[in-house]
Each structure stands twice: as structure tokens, then as C-alpha cells.
């Protein structure tokens, strides 16, 4: 397993601010023991699921170590979200050939959302279920601007990152069709506008989230990091 340090040397680190500590891995080769609380969350999971979970938790502890934390358990919440130590915000992602974690102190960031996907088309029938009509039109325009990117998969990844940034602030589900996304093909950024009432942060309702994306090494990566006391963008 390759675990790299926070910062621009990591794929994910290129999407997130310096206040974020990142660790990533491209396989599950290195054994990664779990705490009892973490093992309980796995239940009777299959071997593949157990391996990616173990590597994800290893990345999470590696990232926490860069914030000055010793090895700690990272149990799972009701929607399998990682439960971080007090004063920490963070997120974990995994897909075929990639696992990563990003964490930050809550005094620096309000929330973080990341996602990794294989750079390949979505399975048949998925796009219509996760997008609005205007988003599908937008994807066709993007394909004309920058061919070779699987924009459908990128949009899916963005919405996954949006949910991961949203959920710690609300504790509520967010459907794929409850946010609309626009993507900047050349700047490699995106904006997601919420179509439902957003969380209130610092007395201001969050209307959506902004982030960055990257396609490299056969992967699609997306990341959102909201600075503390600065909501993503207000309505």
C-alpha cells in the first residue's frame, strides 16, 4: 500500500486547502488492524468490503496523525459516516484502486466532502436518476468543450461530495435531485446549488457548495472544503 502525505504531492491534496491533512492509498496490501468499535460496524461484510474499510481507516488515522492525534477509533454513525474525534471534521472515500481520507480541525474548516470514482461512464440508466434535465444539457455542452472526460461520472462524484459536506451540518438525507451542479471544464471547479433549504452556519443559510475536481490515473476525484465562519456561499 502506498500512503502519501498531506499537500500537493497527493492527488486529493491538490483539491483541498492547506488546513486539510490528507492520506491516500492505491491498494490494500498493508495490514491495517481495526479497533473493536470499528470491527462492530463491519458485521459480516465480504472480504473486499473489509479490506477497503480497513485501508480507509488506516488513511484516516494517518491524516489525523498529521493534526497531532494519536491512534484513535473512528466508529461509524447511522449512515455509516465516520465519527471523528471532538474538534475534527473529515471524510473518507474509496473506489477500485483508491482509498483516501481528509481531515481538518473544526476551527479551520466547517465541513469537508470528498469522493473518488473510476474514470468510466456511469452504468446504463443511472444518469437519468441522479440528474435534472438542465444538468444533462450541461453535460452535453461540456463534452463539446473538453472531449475525453466522462462528465456523467464526474457529476455523480460531485453530488457524492456535496452529500458528504452537507450531512455533518444537517444530519439529513440529500437526494441527488435536490442539488443542481455546474462544472467549469477548464478551471476544474464546480458549484452545487441546493434546491432545498440549506443548513445555517454562523447565522447564514448555506445555499450551496463550491469545490474542485481532478481526472488523473484513471480516477475522478472531487473535493469540497468550507472554511470556518465562511459558509460555502449564501443565498
Image (tube, rainbow, N blue to C red):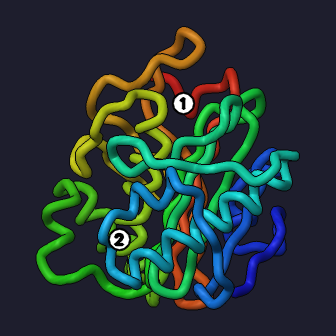
How packed mark 1 is, by other alpha carbons closer than 10 Å (few <14, some 14-19, many 20 or more), is some
* Picture disc at residue 69: none
State the quadrant of the N terminus. Answer: bottom right
Front one among 59 and 36:
36
* Picture disc at residue 233: 1
Front one among 160 and 106:
106
Q: Above or below — where is 230 with respect to 91?
A: above
> Whole-Å distance between the Cαs marked 2 and 1?
25 Å
**Quick check: can you spot residue 188?**
no
**Quick check: can you spot residue 9?**
yes
Query: Could you say which quadrant of the image residue 5 lies in?
Result: bottom right
Q: Are marks 2 and 1 in contact (CB under 8 Å)?
A: no
| Direction front: furthest residue | 36
Residue depicted at 21% across the width and 82% down the height: 123
Q: Which residue has dot 2 on it?
A: 141
Residue depicted at 39% across the width and 76% down the height: 49
User: x%, y% of residue 45?
Assistant: 33, 72
Residue depicted at 50% across the width and 50% down the height: 37
Instruction: Please tell me whether mark 2 or mark 1 is closer to you in this view.
Output: 1
In primary-sequence order, the first of circles 2 and 1 is 2
Query: Could you say which quadrant of the image residue 11 lies in?
Result: bottom right
Locate residue 121 relative to residue 133 in the image: left or right. right
Amino acid at each position: 500500500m502506498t500512503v502519501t502525505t498531506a499537500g500537493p504531492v497527493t492527488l486529493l491534496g491538490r483539491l483541498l486547502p492547506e488546513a486539510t491533512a490528507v492520506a491516500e492509498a492505491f491498494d490494500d496490501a498493508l495490514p491495517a488492524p481495526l479497533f473493536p468499535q470499528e470491527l462492530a460496524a463491519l458485521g459480516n461484510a465480504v472480504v473486499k468490503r473489509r479490506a477497503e474499510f480497513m485501508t480507509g481507516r488506516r488513511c484516516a488515522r494517518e491524516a489525523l496523525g498529521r493534526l497531532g492525534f494519536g491512534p484513535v477509533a473512528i466508529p461509524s454513525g447511522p449512515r455509516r459516516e465516520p465519527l471523528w474525534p471532538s474538534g475534527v471534521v473529515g471524510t473518507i472515500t474509496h473506489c477500485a484502486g483508491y482509498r483516501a481520507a481528509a481531515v481538518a480541525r473544526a476551527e479551520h474548516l466547517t465541513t469537508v466532502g470528498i469522493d473518488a470514482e473510476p474514470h468510466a461512464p456511469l452504468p446504463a440508466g443511472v444518469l437519468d436518476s441522479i440528474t435534472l434535465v438542465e444538468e444533462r444539457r450541461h453535460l452535453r455542452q461540456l463534452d463539446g468543450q473538453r472531449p475525453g472526460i466522462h462528465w456523467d461520472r464526474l457529476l455523480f462524484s460531485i453530488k457524492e461530495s456535496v452529500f458528504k459536506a452537507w450531512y455533518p451540518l444537517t444530519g439529513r438525507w440529500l437526494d441527488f435531485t435536490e442539488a443542481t451542479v455546474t462544472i467549469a471544464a477548464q478551471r476544474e471547479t464546480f458549484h452545487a446549488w441546493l434546491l432545498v433549504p440549506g443548513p445555517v452556519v454562523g447565522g447564514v443559510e448555506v445555499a450551496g457548495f463550491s469545490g474542485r475536481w481532478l481526472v488523473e490515473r484513471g480516477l475522478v476525484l472531487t473535493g469540497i472544503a468550507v472554511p470556518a465562519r465562511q459558509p460555502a456561499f449564501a443565498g
